[in-house]
Amino acid sequence: MAMFSEKKFLATKETSKAKRMAELLRVIILQLGDDVPRAKREFETYAEWMKLPESERLTGKNQAQMIDLYKTFRTRAGLGFERDVYLEQEPGDREVANEAPLPFAVLVHNLRSAFNVGSIIRSTDCFGLEGVHLSGYSCGPDHVTVKSAARGCQEWIPIKRWESPFDCVKWHKENGYEIIALETGEDIPSINEVKWPEKGLIILGNEELGIAPELMAEATMKVTIPMAGRKASMNVAGAYAIMCFKIRSDCGPTT
């Protein structure tokens, strides 16, 4: 949509003005590509024309405050809150982490589910690991479903995409990381029995096919989660969360 002239914008209904301001805030909050700078300029121009107070301007606003401002304009427009914006913030989120991150990261290669990718990003934050690495066709942090599952964590968790998963593995090996494959198999040690290294890169496999054999060959350590029921495996994002909890429990601060 093209930017309104001052005369045309001020002549619109108050609800229409509020709706447009909310639309611009949505672009800014969700960081929707090349439209973000334009949306910021347009928002501030309209705010100046309407002589809005500083409390309803962008300057100095953090993510949570911008979401509150978005809600204000959506309410003025007589509209509800859009789910993808609302999920950028959760009650109880902290400004800083409770504990320093542990030197463990995860490589997410060829996961078909954007929801799984987002869940993995969220677990990385919740259990205090250092970052997420993406390769293959795993969706990135701008994907709407990734954002929905990550619940805002994609804004602060370090995320890097690699052209090749082997480049990611090579870098971590050269920097002293053990390469830890999380897989199924009776001959693989349980997470309850292993001694964790000082630093590790966890490799996760495709939901259907598991870790590719050529990537598995790069692993210096393999672990599995023992199954008590009839199923031989579980959802990759759920398995990763369990592994993160175990690493945090075993390697985190004791006081």
Image (cartoon, grey):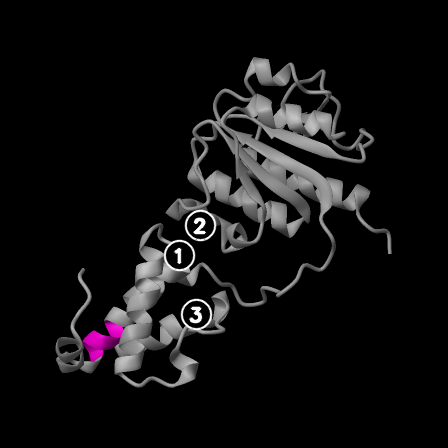
Q: Disc 2 designates what residue?
A: 147
Is residue 205 visible from the viewing direction of this image?
Answer: yes
Q: Disc 3 designates what residue?
A: 66
Tell which of 136 and 40 is nearer to you.
Answer: 40
Do residues under tags 3 and 1 come within 8 Å of each other at their CB atoms?
no
Amino acid type of the residue tagged 2 in the rendering: Lys
Residue 209, x across and y down, in percent: 50, 20
Tell which of 78 and 238 is nearer to you.
Answer: 78
Q: Earlier in the sequence, mark 2 or mark 1?
A: 1
> Regarding mark 1 in the picture, which secondary structure is present there?
loop
Distance between mark 2 and mark 1 Cα atoms: 9 Å
> Regarding mark 2 in the picture, which secondary structure is present there?
helix
Amino acid type of the residue tagged 1 in the rendering: Leu
Camera-near label (2 vs 3) is 3
Q: With respect to residue 3, does 6 lie above or below? A: below
Crowding around mark 1 (Cα neighbors within 10 Å: few <14, some 14 to 19, many 20+) is some
Q: With respect to residue 26, does 120 lie above or below? A: above
Numbered range of the magenta stretch: 15-19
Question: In the image, what residue occupies the spot 30% across and 60% down?
Answer: 38
Amino acid type of the residue tagged 3 in the rendering: Met
> In screen coordinates, is 174 left or right of 115?
right
Q: Earlier in the sequence, mark 3 or mark 1?
A: 1
Tell which of 17 and 34 is nearer to you.
Answer: 34
Question: In the image, what residue occupies the spot 48% across and 65% down?
Answer: 63
For residue 28: magenta?
Answer: no
Distance between mark 2 and mark 3 Cα atoms: 17 Å
Q: Disc 1 designates what residue?
A: 30
Question: In the image, what residue occupies the spot 49% across and 44% down?
Answer: 118
Numbered tag placed on residue 53 in the rendering: none
Residue 241, x across and y down, in percent: 62, 41
